Image: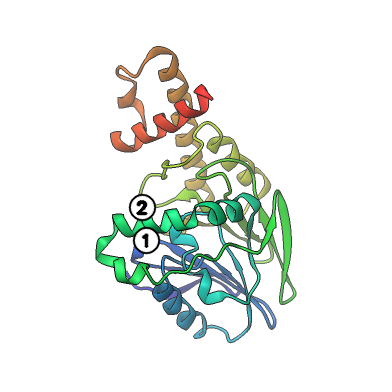
Amino acid sequence: MNEQWREVGDRVYVRRHQSFDMNVGLIVGDGHCLVLDTRTSHREAADLIEAIRKITAYPWTVVNSHSHFDHYFGNALFRGAEIWAHSRCAEEIDQFGEEQLANVIKSLPERREELEEVTIVPPDHTFTTAASLDIGGRIVHLRHFGLGHSSNDVVVHVPDAGVVFAGDLVEEGAPPAFSDSYPLDWPATTAAMLAEMPEQVIVPGHGAVVDRAFALAQQAELTLVADLAKQAHVEGLRDLIKRFPYPEDVARQAIDRAFLQLDA
């Protein structure tokens, strides 16, 4: 994979990385820029900063799209900048960041030395539903539409460029990740995003940049997952698992999470 910036709108860039097939966003205004997500380690963040500096020398504001490690473990290298996120993102990182780091080190032993360098730095600027940032004269909107891939997904909207950074609410190249998701809410959350933001350029948290048709199709898949999970909760799985639009391991994870919601 060629880890180069791709301009997807006026001075709006995406860099897709081999590590977790993850996308980072860069929005450049006059005298300031916004960086969306900081990657998995200090080393990856340093690589990101070097790449940013090939585009702009402007100071930055950082946004964390949500509280999963691959999106914020690099925050420490951006210390001194405002780091924005949903309020629950900051709370979860503050409460569970060290535990998350320990678990990632266990799951990626080949990267232990790299990950042991990580200092957990939670976001220091938060919102609950909506915020607007002036990025060098460009207004960039941050929105939280509800529960979905996580409890704290942030969508970044750049209206003057016609670009939406959907974070992990939209995934390309692999099925959506349900590990700590809210499958019963996710379809409505994505639908609300698409209803408010008619843009054709949608940047997923991972994978290739997609269009509105792709996002609508994935929202329909998520709706089917939620409907089948509700049916399975009443009737039992039986042959229903075969009707899920994702591989069985992914479907079972979605079902487990949906059942937690239904049993709550």
Quadrant containing the N terminus in the rendered view: bottom left
Q: Is residue 91 visible?
A: yes
Q: Residue at x 47, y 35 (%)?
A: 222
Q: Is residue 18 above or below residue 263?
A: below
Q: Which colour style is shown?
A: rainbow
Q: Which residue is drawn at 54% across and 52% down?
A: 95
Of 146 and 163, nearer the camera is 146
**Residues at marks 2 and 1, CA–CA distance in whole angstroms:** 9 Å
Give how far across and how far down residue 224 sits, in percent. 45, 29
Q: Earlier in the sequence, mark 2 or mark 1?
A: 1
Of 194 and 154, nearer the camera is 154
Give how far across and how far down residue 220 sits, in percent. 49, 35
Q: Which mark is residue 173?
A: 2
SS of the residue under disc 2? loop
Q: Residue at x 38, y 67 (%)?
A: 17
Query: Are the residues flagged by discs 2 and 1 in contact, CB closer than 8 Å?
Result: yes
- Indicate the amino acid at tag 2: Gly
Crowding around mark 2 (Cα neighbors within 10 Å: few <14, some 14 to 19, many 20+) is few
Q: Which mark is residue 21?
A: 1
